[in-house]
């Protein structure tokens, strides 16, 4: 146990975690050269395509140092603001962290938020100044920022480049030298923390754990403390590039367990594994996730509802931050109301459902959670516009507020403040980190920032601003429900809850946007926006000229085929509501109004 090191890599997105992880795996010959693939840990297709890390991944390396063999367990973490929940889970399984900072960018918002998580968990921090191969690297300036932030010595900071392979051995040495060996008693009752799990259709559910105390042997009877369920440890082992089974694993180790679990509900990340005989007590797990955005997910084919449910259960196993419950919509039928960490998370869930489970789904207009105080009953939590009580009974409505931390070059301070004020934000604090870097703190309604605020911020700062935020509570706000009607019929899945000051403008622009997005039909479609009984805007989608296809007869076969194919593709994410077809984009139109 004295030669085990459990560590994670934390950094702001794009500062080079995955690339550096590749170099560590190469250097320790964890992967043979012929197996080496770019960004090895990002083994979800989606991660490779988007070039971001979504899931945390664990992998074990062996490294000889000062004449002894070390076992290094690396847990990679995602950097996007939506996925800080994954980060906190990885951190709980480690004793140390590499803090990677891009030497051409400097410290960013997630560098700081992840660092605080790590410090809060008493991790030893090894600062790494990355990408020093870049001609515009600013090693001195960024080192100053790091020293200021964590109070380390200048010589503690390792200069590295994942791309050019600089500083790799020094990092591995520092991991052995500076990160403490795991504590824990192999003789004590078993306590293994579940930090992740994944569904494997051949082997059932794989559970990833970190043993804090005790020893686990293959074949033993184990119990998951929170669920109370018992299993046999059919297979245990360590996570190399592939799984390597073991007979015995002791305190300090990170590994996997397979015990024929088929039901996703039985595995809870944060749960503790112990023995049925001589049980230990549960480890303090993770905080419950707080979903920020809610939206409905509906199957495009209503007959696929049950299949969608089982797909969601399996996905949830691998994504503990996804929460959902059944919901019915007058327009869309049976589906699920889901809570997401942010818009990127929502997109990823939709894409994973389609890719990994072959489902075609529609996500409805996203919303934050509002609290409606009524004159009739207690407070109602409103996760969907359709759950909003009748206006006559509403006493007042509260909406979630956040504290946003924005770090940027000083030249962008003006535009950033303007943007935040436009989003109903209040500037609370402004500090200069260095002469050229400013940290601003705002209090803002969550609803104004979860949707597209981050993109806007990037645009006005030419990519030089970063954002991190946390919920600070609910505050009274003048919100109203904006309904959309198609040919006189209210489509509940298109409703939104908006601030009264913005409602008229939104209604107008939403109708215009929908006019662009709704495909023409054989008849006219009237689009109306309403608040309560009052119509505030109207647009019309003209009827299609009947012979769009007929025109292609008599010759141009390829054009006709193209048209049909286009139609077929369009079908994919389209739902029939009454006699109107609504494409996926229409449900997200409300997000793209300005
Ligand atoms: P992550 O989001 O932190 O996992 O970052 P990645 O490892 O995916 O790297 C983000 C981008 O920076 C990619 O385009 C990499 O090729 C590039 N990159 C990573 N490390 C280095 C480095 O040391 N030097 C240079 N010049 N580019 C790097
Ligand atoms: Mg990555």
Image (spheres, rainbow, N blue to C red):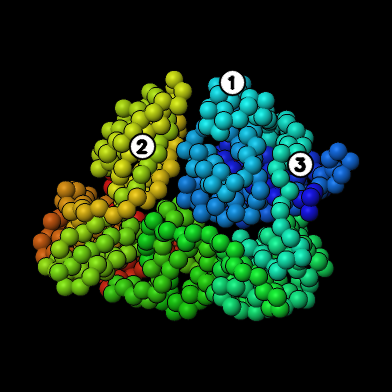
In front of the other: 197 or 346: 197
Residue 60 coordinates in the image, percent (x, y): 75, 52
Q: Residues within 10 Å of mark 3 (few under 14, many from 20)?
A: many
Cα–Cα span, label 3 and label 2: 38 Å
Instruction: Give the left or right position of residue 572, taking residue 577 as reference.
Output: right
Q: Earlier in the sequence, mark 2 or mark 1?
A: 1
**Whether residue 333 is visible:** yes
Whether label 2 lies within 8 Å of ligand 1 gets the answer no
Residue at 49 percent of width and 59 percent of height: 287
Residue 243 coordinates in the image, percent (x, y): 76, 61
Identify the image quadrant of residue 232. Answer: bottom right
In front of the other: 237 or 243: 237
Instruction: Give the left or right position of residue 477, taking residue 577 as reference.
Output: left
Residue 407 coordinates in the image, percent (x, y): 43, 33
Q: Is residue 365 above or below residue 308?
A: above
Q: Is residue 296 above or below residue 106?
A: below
Which residue in the structure is indicated by mark 2? 441
Identify the image quadrant of residue 14. Answer: top right
């Amino acid at each position: 146990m004295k030669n085990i090191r459990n560590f994670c890599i934390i950094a702001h997105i794009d500062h080079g975690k995955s690339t550096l992880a590749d170099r560590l795996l190469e250097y320790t010959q964890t992967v043979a050269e012929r197996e080496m693939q770019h960004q090895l840990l990002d083994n979800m297709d989606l991660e490779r395509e988007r070039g971001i890390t979504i899931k945390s991944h664990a992998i074990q390396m062996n490294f000889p140092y000062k004449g002894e063999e070390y076992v290094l367990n690396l847990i990679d973490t995602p950097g996007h603001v939506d996925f800080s929940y994954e980060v906190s889970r990885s951190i709980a399984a480690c004793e140390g962290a590499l803090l990677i900072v891009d030497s051409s960018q400097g410290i960013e918002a997630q560098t700081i938020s992840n660092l605080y998580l790590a410090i809060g968990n008493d991790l030893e921090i090894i600062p790494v100044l990355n990408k020093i191969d870049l001609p515009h690297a600013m090693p001195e300036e960024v080192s100053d920022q790091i020293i200021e932030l964590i109070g380390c010595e200048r010589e503690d900071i390792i200069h590295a480049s994942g791309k050019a392979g600089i500083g790799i051995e020094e990092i591995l040495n520092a991991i052995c030298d500076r990160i403490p060996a795991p504590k824990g008693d192999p003789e004590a009752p078993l306590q293994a923390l579940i930090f992740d799990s994944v569904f494997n259709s051949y082997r059932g559910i794989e559970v990833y754990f970190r043993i804090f105390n005790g020893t686990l042997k293959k074949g033993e009877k184990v119990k998951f403390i929170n669920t109370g369920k018992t299993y046999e440890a059919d297979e245990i082992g360590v996570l190399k590039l592939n799984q390597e089974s073991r007979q015995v694993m002791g305190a300090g180790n990170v590994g996997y367990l397979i015990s024929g679990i088929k039901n996703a509900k039985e595995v809870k990340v944060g749960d503790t594994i112990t023995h049925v005989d001589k049980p230990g007590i549960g480890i303090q797990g993770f905080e419950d996730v707080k979903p920020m955005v809610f939206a409905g997910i509906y199957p495009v084919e209503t007959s696929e509802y049950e299949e969608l449910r089982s797909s969601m259960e399996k996905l949830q196993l691998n994504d503990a931050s996804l929460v959902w419950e059944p919901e019915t919509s007058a327009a869309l039928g049976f589906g699920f109301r889901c809570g997401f960490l942010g818009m990127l998370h929502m997109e990823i869930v939709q894409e994973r459902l389609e890719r990994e489970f072959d489902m075609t789904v529609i996500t409805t207009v996203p919303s934050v959670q509002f609290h409606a105080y009524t004159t009739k009953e207690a407070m109602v939590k409103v996760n969907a516009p359709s759950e909003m009580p009748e206006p006559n009974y509403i006493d007042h409505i509260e909406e979630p507020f956040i504290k946003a931390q924005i770090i940027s070059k000083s030249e962008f301070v003006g535009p950033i403040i303007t943007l935040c004020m436009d989003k109903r934000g209040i500037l609370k604090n402004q500090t200069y980190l260095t002469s050229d870097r400013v940290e601003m703190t705002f209090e803002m309604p969550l609803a104004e920032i979860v949707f597209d605020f981050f993109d806007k911020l990037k645009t006005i700062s030419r990519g030089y601003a970063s954002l991190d935020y946390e919920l600070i509570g609910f505050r009274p706000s003048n919100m109203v429900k904006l309904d959309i009607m198609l040919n006189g019929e209210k489509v509940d899945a298109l409703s939104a809850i908006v601030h009264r000051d913005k409602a008229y403008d939104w209604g107008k622009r939403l109708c215009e946007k929908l006019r662009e997005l709704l495909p023409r039909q054989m008849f006219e479609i009237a689009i109306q926006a309403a608040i309560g009984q009052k119509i505030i805007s109207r647009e019309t989608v003209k009827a299609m000229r009947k012979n769009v296809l007929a025109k292609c007869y008599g010759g141009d076969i390829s054009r006709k085929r193209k048209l049909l194919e286009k139609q077929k593709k369009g079908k994919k994410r389209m739902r029939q509501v009454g006699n109107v077809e609504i494409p996926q984009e229409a449900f997200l139109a409300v997000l793209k109004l300005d």
